[in-house]
Image (tube, rainbow, N blue to C red):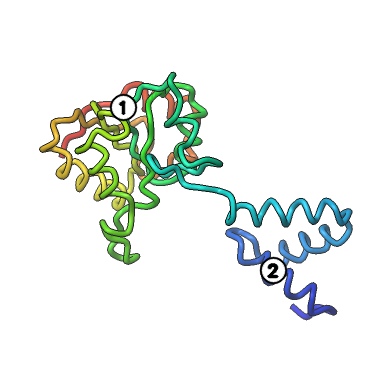
């Protein structure tokens, strides 16, 4: 795509690196931003920069947070003995939107996928096992394995189940209201809510 400006070309290149944004969409966004008030563009650029400079991952559950400990982990109204293990931050948001779950979370930041070079050491499995073993910050009574119903998600669930067996904690998984192969972020709230409310014991 031949553009009349190097500055515009650079903006299009950067915008097109975003997921799902092609060159044409990136050009449309860039031209839109050119028409915007300078203050609005500054606000946008500063908010994006703050994602890298000021956003944290909770030191307990690895959810995104403005503070060292996220509002969910620090809430006195949550059931601290239940930990729901999810793949990513979007899954936390999806489950929270159901308003059916009052426990805590543990965000792995991925699932085991040898074909993609993602092993046990590349995601937050060690910190989960340590959390269960030490009872910090709260003693864990139940671990819900709420991972995708994909080959990689199931592999990760089976691995965690084996690792957690000796701890004596109750291990459950979502009822299969969530279709096999679906990501939680795309499940409707009613189906996801029923799945979390009617979770079942995890079995090999």
Asked where in the image residue 129 lies, by quadrant, the reply is top left
Residue toward you, 23 or 9: 9
Q: Is residue 188 left or right of residue 169?
A: right
Q: Position of residue 29 (x, y in %)?
A: 76, 59
2 vs 1, front mark? 1
Residue 18, above or below 190: below
Q: Position of residue 24 (x, y in %)?
A: 73, 66
Q: Residue at x 32, y 22 (%)?
A: 198
Nearest to N terminus: mark 2 or mark 1: 2
Q: Position of residue 160 (x, y in %)?
A: 22, 44
3D distance between C-alphas at marks 2 and 1: 45 Å
Q: Position of residue 188 (x, y in %)?
A: 50, 32
Which residue is labeled 1 in the image?
A: 82
Which residue is labeled 2 in the image?
A: 23
Q: Quadrant of the N terminus?
A: bottom right
Q: Residue furthest left?
A: 166
Q: Secondary structure at mark 1?
A: strand
Q: Quadrant of the C terminus?
A: top left
């Amino acid at each position: 795509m031949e553009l009349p400006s190097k500055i515009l070309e650079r903006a299009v290149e950067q915008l097109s690196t975003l997921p799902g944004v092609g060159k044409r969409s990136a050009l449309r966004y860039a031209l839109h931003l050119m028409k915007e008030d300078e203050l609005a563009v500054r606000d946008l650029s500063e908010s994006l920069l703050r994602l890298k400079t000021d956003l944290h991952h909770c030191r307990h559950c690895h959810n995104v947070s403005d503070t060292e400990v996220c509002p969910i982990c620090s809430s006195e109204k949550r059931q601290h003995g239940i930990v729901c293990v999810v793949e990513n931050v979007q899954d936390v948001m999806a489950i929270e939107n159901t308003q059916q779950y009052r426990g805590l979370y543990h965000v792995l930041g991925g699932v085991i996928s040898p074909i993609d070079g993602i092993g046990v050491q590349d995601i937050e499995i060690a910190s989960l096992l340590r959390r269960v073993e030490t009872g910090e910050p709260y003693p864990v009574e139940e671990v819900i394995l709420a991972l995708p119903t994909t080959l990689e998600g199931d592999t990760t669930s089976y691995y965690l189940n084996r690792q957690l067996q000796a701890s004596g904690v109750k291990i459950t998984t979502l009822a299969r209201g969530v279709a096999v192969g679906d990501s939680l972020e795309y499940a409707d709230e009613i189906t996801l809510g029923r799945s979390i409310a009617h979770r079942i014991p995890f079995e090999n």
